Image (cartoon, rainbow, N blue to C red):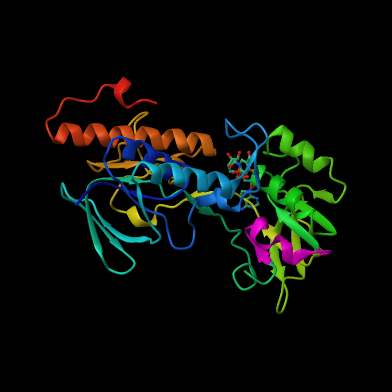
């Protein structure tokens, strides 16, 4: 039986692992088969993670976090958890092979998943001109005309990145002002390959074998128009990945896992949550990492209390 099992391999999961491992809890971390490293694996330059004044590539940052976690004894497994049982004092997690893993505490750091538009043609043409990841698929759109949907940092980042390959990039946004940070907005405004289509949403994606045309609906007057494209990137945000814990942990109205105050304590004793899965507001790599720290310290204190040991002093576990 493990002292702590961590589910998730983004900044929250690996930071929790670094702290838990340094506290000699020898964590087992489930890193997923397909989405190892979380959202930063699909990011190019990360310019706002402290300590990297020149910026760092998202995958390189995740690799460093993993190395740091493993250096102190974290065991990383490239598999997913498919079922959880939090009812008893001993938590039971079933992986995709059906193996049951037991732990005295669990840190849930499953992050968030790309949001879909929910329009006709999206599912059918997914992987055929419709994508959620510019860094994964941008290369296939050399000299093409493509569109990006969204007005946040992700949409600006994707659009700017895609101009490396594409002939032209439309950004389709449902309002007339952007949600993205000023620096990301300006970068997109300054890029002559990018053209903004304001107050518009995608009503339908057309194409036989590949996306070739959009029906756009004006959000002000409801009029519809057609836009020929050769690819579409959807960057309209993410939803917390909570499907494993529906009916098992309390959720907030926003769909994130509910935690007590500033702690990581969920509605189940011994189960802690961290990162995007509890955060409807900030959702930065650095806030997720900090949240992972909180979860590891909470798990450590919980285990110490179970053992009847004195609570560790904050100073003893810090730094
Ligand atoms: P976001 O900030 O939630 O923005 C989502 C955008 O998509 C908003 O502009 C929203 O419109 C629009 N949208 C949502 N649902 C839509 C729909 N159904 N149809 C059309 N448009 C829709 O999401 P995000 O851009 O993915 O960013 C998530 C977090 O990651 C943010 O905290 C962001 O700062 C961070 N991030 C940071 C960086 C960076 O610093 N390098 C890069 C990427 C992401 P409204 O504006 O009308 O709401």
Name the residue at 42% across, 35% down: 291
Judge whether residue 116 can be spotted in this image.
yes
Count of all numbered marks drawn on residues in the image: 0
295 part of magenta stretch? no
On screen, residue 12 versus residue 96, left or right, reads right
Please name whichever residue, 117 or 284, is drawn nearer the observer in this view of the structure. 284
135 part of magenta stretch? yes
Q: In this view, does 261 lie above or below 254?
A: above
Q: Give the range drawn in magenta.
A: 130-144
Please name whichever residue, 26 or 138, is drawn nearer the observer in this view of the structure. 26
On screen, residue 237 versus residue 205, left or right, reads left
Please name whichever residue, 176 or 134, is drawn nearer the observer in this view of the structure. 134
Q: In which quarter of the image is residue 165?
A: bottom right
Please name whichever residue, 43 or 281, is drawn nearer the observer in this view of the structure. 43
Judge whether residue 253 can be spotted in this image.
no
Q: Is residue 223 above or below residue 307?
A: below
Q: In this view, does 99 lie above or below 64?
A: below
Picture quarter with ligand 1: top right
């Amino acid at each position: 039986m493990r002292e702590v099992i961590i589910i998730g391999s983004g900044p929250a999961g690996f930071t929790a692992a670094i702290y838990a491992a340094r506290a000699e809890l020898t964590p087992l971390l489930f890193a997923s088969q397909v989405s190892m490293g979380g959202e930063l694996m699909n990011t190019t330059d990360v310019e706002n993670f402290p300590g990297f004044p020149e910026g760092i590539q998202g995958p390189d940052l995740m690799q460093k976090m993993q190395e740091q976690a493993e250096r102190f004894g974290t065991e990383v497994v490239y598999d997913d958890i498919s079922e959880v049982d939090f009812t008893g004092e001993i938590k039971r997690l079933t992986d995709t092979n059906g193996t049951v893993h037991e732990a005295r505490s669990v840190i849930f750091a499953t992050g968030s998943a790309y949001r879909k538009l929910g329009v006709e043609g999206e599912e059918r043409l997914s992987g055929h001109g419709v994508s959620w990841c510019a860094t994964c698929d941008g290369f296939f759109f050399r000299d093409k005309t493509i569109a990006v949907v969204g007005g946040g940092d992700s949409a600006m980042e994707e659009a700017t990145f895609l101009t490396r390959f594409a002939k032209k990039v439309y950004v389709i946004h449902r309002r007339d002002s952007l949600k993205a940070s000023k620096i990301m907005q300006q970068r997109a405004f300054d890029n002559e390959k990018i053209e903004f289509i304001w107050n518009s949403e995608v009503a339908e994606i057309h194409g036989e074998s590949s996306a070739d045309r959009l029906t756009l609906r004006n959000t002000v007057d409801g009029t519809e128009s057609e836009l020929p494209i050769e690819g579409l990137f959807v960057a309209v945000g993410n939803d917390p990945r909570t499907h494993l814990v529906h009916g098992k942990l309390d959720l907030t109205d926003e769909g994130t896992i509910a935690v007590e105050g500033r702690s990581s304590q969920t509605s189940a004793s011994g189960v802690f949550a961290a990162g995007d899965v509890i955060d409807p507001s900030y959702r930065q790599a650095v806030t997720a990492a900090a949240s992972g720290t909180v979860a590891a310290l909470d798990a450590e204190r919980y285990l110490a209390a179970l053992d009847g040991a004195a609570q560790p002093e904050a100073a003893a576990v810090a730094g």
